[in-house]
Image (spheres, rainbow, N blue to C red):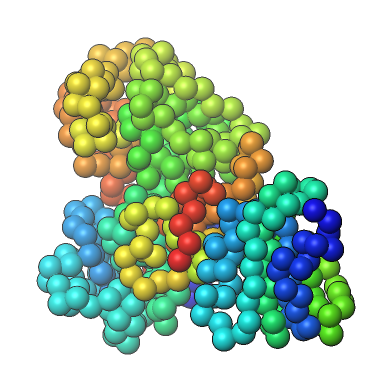
């Protein structure tokens, strides 16, 4: 992984994914270290973000590294019409590694081709968000003790949610049984289902949420966005069908955990938050350890 | 119409390349893809010629020009039936069918409007693959979305 960019979860083999998770486990035991002393990490957020940016910056600073960068395109030279190539070439001169988020699909792959330092993709438009995928895998393994042979439900917008797409691809390496719960308009795209089929795994599609809750080890919730529906009436029909309430977890397995990439709007009722089965805020914390593992391994320090 | 007579419709060339069996409707696309609209060589073309195999075909003859395989393979995207004939001193030296290459660079636009290649000066790059219905598709190297032949727009 040393000196290699991470743009798409497919850039890592199964063995490399497991290595990152193992390293993250070590950082969780000892998150404050000095191994990044003297290293400069560029944090280029052309598009706003709360969790991803702050957890990256916190991860780096807890390891003694320093951060340069910007948190929106408005406060960078993009505002003056600078191309992505020029920004990346310039920032390559000032840093040992670049973390970037951009609203355009494929921008991170392109940046990794022009940069002289490695790139970590922190989200490129609707395409990839590999560090989210790795922290989701970490959260699943940590709560279930394994990644193999689990029943995992994805709920909500499976069509446009990039986290669902990358996580489905990664979980296809681990003998997962997929339970796909969505309105008919927002089913998982066939290109993503192809990964499940190619791995000789099974998936079932549901429209009724209650049908799957008792069988699952992980319930992965996503937000259904109003703007995805051309007809507002269609949105009104489904908007409340995929809201998780605490009472719905009554018949769930003891070990089940509810995950969500956040931010949530209303798809998880706040009465779930105090249930020990709710895991989304710890999931966000795990992002720090996974990002520490990535930065340290790409810089060749572990 | 005899084969001999057909050869006379589009002049014979002494040295160069003949691209035969092009689907009639794709001739202008092939001309564009190979940059023949900008060449200083002699170019002859025919459209809606009779063909035993394909009913209506197109043909292009380019004087003093030989293509590298990778150049010609580009035209396989729009003219999968095309045959390439190398001519030296009026004789056919070699004949070959075009093949769809494994990667396609620069000639097709990515169908995803939010792809980086449609926003900045980044040349397109695709991997060719076949879906479960054996339909050829292009997977974008950058945005990872697929472009189908029905949505091909040539650069």
Estimate the x, y position of residue B36 in percent, counting from the top left: 57, 75
Estimate the x, y position of residue B15 in percent, counting from the top left: 77, 83
Residue B10 shown left or right of residue A27 in the figure = right
Q: Residue at x 30, y 42 (%)?
A: A261
To which quarter of the image does residue A276 belong?
top left
The answer to whether B34 is drawn above or below residue A239 in the figure is below
To which quarter of the image does residue A92 belong?
bottom left
Q: Residue at x 34, y 82 (%)?
A: A89
Residue A37 shown left or right of residue A150 in the figure = left
To which quarter of the image does residue B20 belong?
bottom right
Estimate the x, y position of residue B119 in percent, counting from the top left: 32, 65
The answer to whether A52 is drawn above or below residue A139 in the figure is below
Answer yes or no: is residue B117 visible.
Answer: yes
Residue B150 shown left or right of residue B21 in the figure = left
Q: How many marks?
A: 0
Residue A298 shown left or right of residue A276 in the figure = right
Say which of A164 and A226 sits in front.
Answer: A226
Estimate the x, y position of residue A159 in percent, counting from the top left: 38, 36
Q: Residue at x 79, y 48 (%)?
A: B53
Q: Residue at x 34, y 50 (%)?
A: A126
The answer to whether A124 is drawn above or below residue A144 in the figure is below
Answer yes or no: is residue A26 visible.
Answer: no
């Amino acid at each position: 992984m040393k000196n290699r960019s991470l743009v798409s979860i497919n850039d890592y083999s199964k063995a490399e994914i497991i290595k990152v998770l193992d390293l993250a486990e070590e950082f969780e035991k000892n998150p404050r270290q000095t191994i990044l002393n003297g290293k400069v990490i560029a944090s280029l957020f052309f598009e706003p973000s709360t969790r991803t940016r702050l957890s990256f910056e916190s991860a780096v600073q807890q390891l003694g590294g320093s951060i340069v960068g910007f948190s929106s395109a408005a406060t960078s030279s993009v505002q003056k019409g600078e191309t992505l190539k020029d920004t990346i070439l310039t920032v390559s001169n000032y840093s040992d590694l670049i973390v970037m988020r951009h609203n355009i699909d494929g921008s991170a792959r392109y940046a990794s081709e022009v940069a002289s330092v490695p790139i970590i993709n922190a989200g490129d438009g609707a395409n990839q968000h590999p560090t989210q995928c790795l922290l989701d895998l970490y959260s699943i393994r940590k709560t279930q003790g394994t990644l193999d042979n689990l029943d995992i439900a994805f709920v909500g917008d499976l069509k446009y949610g990039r986290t669902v797409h990358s996580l489905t691809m990664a979980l296809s390496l681990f003998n997962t049984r997929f339970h796909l719960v969505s309105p008919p308009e927002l089913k998982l795209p066939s290109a993503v289902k192809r990964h499940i089929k190619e791995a000789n795994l099974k998936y079932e599609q549901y429209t009724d949420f209650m049908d799957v809750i008792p069988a699952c080890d992980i319930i992965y919730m996503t937000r259904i966005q109003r703007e995805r529906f051309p007809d507002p009436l269609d949105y009104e029909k489904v908007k409340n069908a995929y809201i998780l309430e605490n009472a719905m977890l009554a018949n769930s397995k003891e070990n089940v955990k509810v995950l969500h990439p956040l931010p949530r709007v209303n798809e998880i009722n706040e009465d779930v938050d105090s249930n020990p089965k709710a895991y989304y805020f710890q999931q966000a914390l795990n992002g720090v350890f996974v990002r520490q593992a990535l930065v340290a391994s790409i810089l060749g320090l572990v | 119409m005899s084969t001999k007579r057909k050869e006379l419709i589009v002049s014979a060339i002494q040295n160069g390349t003949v691209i035969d069996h092009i689907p009639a409707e794709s001739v202008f696309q092939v001309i564009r893809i190979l940059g023949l609209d900008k060449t200083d060589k002699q170019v002859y073309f025919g459209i809606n010629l009779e063909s035993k195999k394909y009913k209506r075909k197109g043909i292009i003859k380019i004087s003093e020009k030989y293509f590298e395989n990778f150049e010609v393979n580009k035209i396989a995207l729009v003219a999968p039936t095309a045959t390439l004939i190398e001519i030296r001193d009026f004789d056919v030296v070699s004949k070959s069918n075009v093949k769809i290459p494994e990667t396609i660079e620069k000639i097709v636009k990515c169908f995803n409007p939010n792809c980086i290649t449609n926003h900045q000066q980044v040349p397109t790059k695709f991997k060719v693959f076949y879906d479960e219905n054996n339909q050829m598709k292009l997977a974008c190297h950058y945005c990872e979305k697929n472009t189908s032949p029905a949505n091909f727009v040539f650069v």
